[in-house]
Amino acid sequence: MLYDPVSDLRRFVASADGSDKKSPITPRQDMLIKCDSRAQSPFAELCECLPTGRDHADFERYIKPVRNTVAFHYDPKQVNSALEFRTTHPSNLACSMTVGEDIHSCRFEFADVVLDTIVYRKLWQIPVDADVRVEADLQTGALESPCNFSNSQEILSPSS
């Protein structure tokens, strides 16, 4: 039988008050107990993106295509298509490039535009006449899962 982290985590959360003495704590649960509560909740949400989790369909729709096309795998066809779109679409504005003291302080806006074209226009199919930022927020903001990027960024920010 395959290990099911979603079920394991649900059992752990259900027995976190100590009332379930029959279920021993697994090594994964022991590791999770040692984490700050701000890490435990996002981990539980992330587990819901696994195949047995309630948010798996959202993960498949929003995250997996990004992973397979631009994040961990490089699809030259998508890049070429985005470049062609950017050179022919009438609403394209000039992009800037800012050079800083090191790689972390440099900004190449055109790369962001190409990435946005691939992710938002091609993968997530946001129409050309729609405001891409508004539509992306609407699509992902309606999700009660780690696919809601604003929630993920809030947890990762140094001020939290």
Image (cartoon, rainbow, N blue to C red):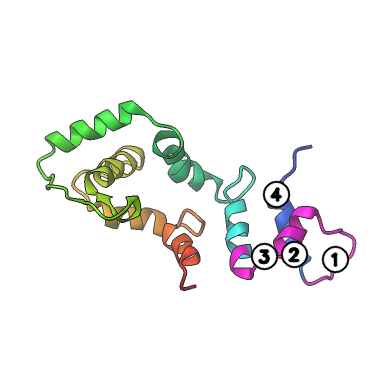
Q: Mark 1 or mark 4, which has the lower sequence index?
A: 4
Mark 3 or mark 4, whichever is nearer to me: 3
Q: Mark 2 or mark 1, which has the lower sequence index?
A: 2
SS assignment at label 4: helix
Q: Which residues are magenta?
A: 17-39
**C-alpha separation, residue under disc 2 versus residue under disc 4:** 14 Å
Question: In the rendering, which numbered label is found on residue 14?
Answer: 2
**C-alpha separation, residue under disc 3 versus residue under disc 4:** 17 Å
Q: Mark 2 or mark 4, which has the lower sequence index?
A: 4
Other residues around mark 3 within 10 Å, as few (<14) / some (14–19) / many (≥20): few
User: Disc 4 designates what residue?
Assistant: 5
Q: Quadrant of residue 86?
A: top left
Question: In the rendering, which numbered label is found on residue 20?
Answer: 1
Which residue is nearer to you in this view: 57 or 32?
A: 32
**C-alpha separation, residue under disc 1 versus residue under disc 4:** 18 Å
Q: Residue at x 21, y 43 (%)?
A: 128
